[in-house]
Image (cartoon, grey):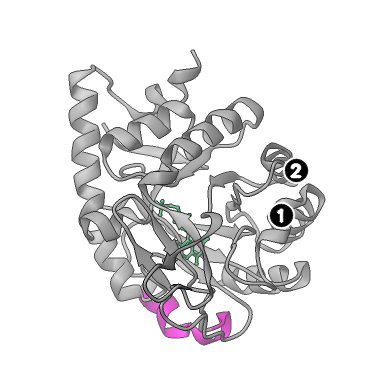
Amino acid sequence: MLSTSFAGIELENPTVLAAGILGTSAAILKRVADSGAGAVTIKSIGPKKREGHSNPTVLFFDSYLMNAVGLPTPGYRNMEREWEELKEINVPVIASIYASSIEEFVEVAQYVASRKPDAIELNISCPNTKAHGMLFGKDPSIAHDVVSQVKEVTNNIPIFAKLTPNTDRVIEVARACEEAGADAIVAFNTWGPGMYIDINTRRPVLHYRTGGVSGPAVKPLVVKGIYELYEHVSLPILGVGGITNGNDAIEMIMAGASAIGIGSAVYYRGIDVFKRICDEMQGWMLTHDYKSIKELVGVAHE
Ligand SMILES: Cc1cc2nc3c(=O)[nH]c(=O)nc-3n(C[C@H](O)[C@H](O)[C@H](O)COP(=O)(O)O)c2cc1C
């Protein structure tokens, strides 16, 4: 009932571990796969080793999470052991990559493609570093060039463009990615950035001061964003942001997502959140007489 396909990739269920939540370690990603995720995304890999920001990097509240992890990465050349171990994961593996120039995106993508992940996700949307990220996803012509040049060096591996919601040009950027040959849109990275000030110390708590916002509070914004994307692009959409339970997942699919990413909910409900969300979705579908995920995609538009 939950099996589906996304951008040509067969999934046992539509839940995908979102990038960055559980790092690059193959052992942890394998645990997530064994706990019921339909696919897993590796934390964004960059061109060179990078430490990321100092602690505290993640703040956790009832209704949202705020993070400024700052894209720590071993660098794509220093992951040989991980790539070997990642082969043992029995669900599709999506490799997220970031870079600070189009040339670097091409360099990282070419190498990562040689390790044969099931898809490559281009993080053109990180709000947490000065040099990397959002710029690419805010300008349609730069987004176009990143995608089209990466497509040239990645053979037939599906390329996903992960968008930032923090621009009024989301639709233009998505269309540019589509024209450039992207195989799917991932919507969205974190929102903001935001800031949390401890009123007792009178200082911002995150070491980087600001951080991207995710978790339950962003869900209505993501649902609306996906609803609009569905009307303007024909690529499959991986809906990411604020999904905590099966009802949230169904809502996102009704808005137009063909699969759903789960990030902050791992903090809220633990590593077996994937199986729990699948059970909840299945319960809803049985009650409402839906036999497949595909029947539900975009029904809110009918
Ligand atoms: C701690 C943390 C680290 C993240 N790291 C990345 C990353 O490396 N690359 C990326 O594309 N997105 C990253 N994200 C964004 C998530 O993949 C996701 O897009 C966002 O959190 C919204 O989904 P959620 O509300 O389910 O968490 C990170 C999010 C969090 C909370």
Amino acid type at image mark 1: Val
Relative to residue 130, is residue 92 depicted above or below?
above
Mark 1 or 2, which is nearer the eye?
Answer: 2
**Label 1 vs 2, first from the N-terminus:** 1
- The mark found on residue 176 in the picture is 2
Q: Which residues are magenta?
A: 75-85
Residue 147, numbered label: 1
Label 1 CB-ligand 1 distance < 8 A: no
Relative image position of residue 77 (x, y in whole percent): 57, 84
Query: Which x, y percent locates residue 231?
Result: 61, 25
Question: Outermost residue, right direction?
Answer: 141
Q: Is residue 81 magenta?
A: yes
Residue 177 visible in image: yes
Tell whether label 2 touches label 1 (CB within 8 Å): yes
Residue at 64% over, 73% down: 108
Estimate the x, y position of residue 10 in percent, counting from the top left: 40, 44
Q: Is residue 212 above or below residue 262?
A: below
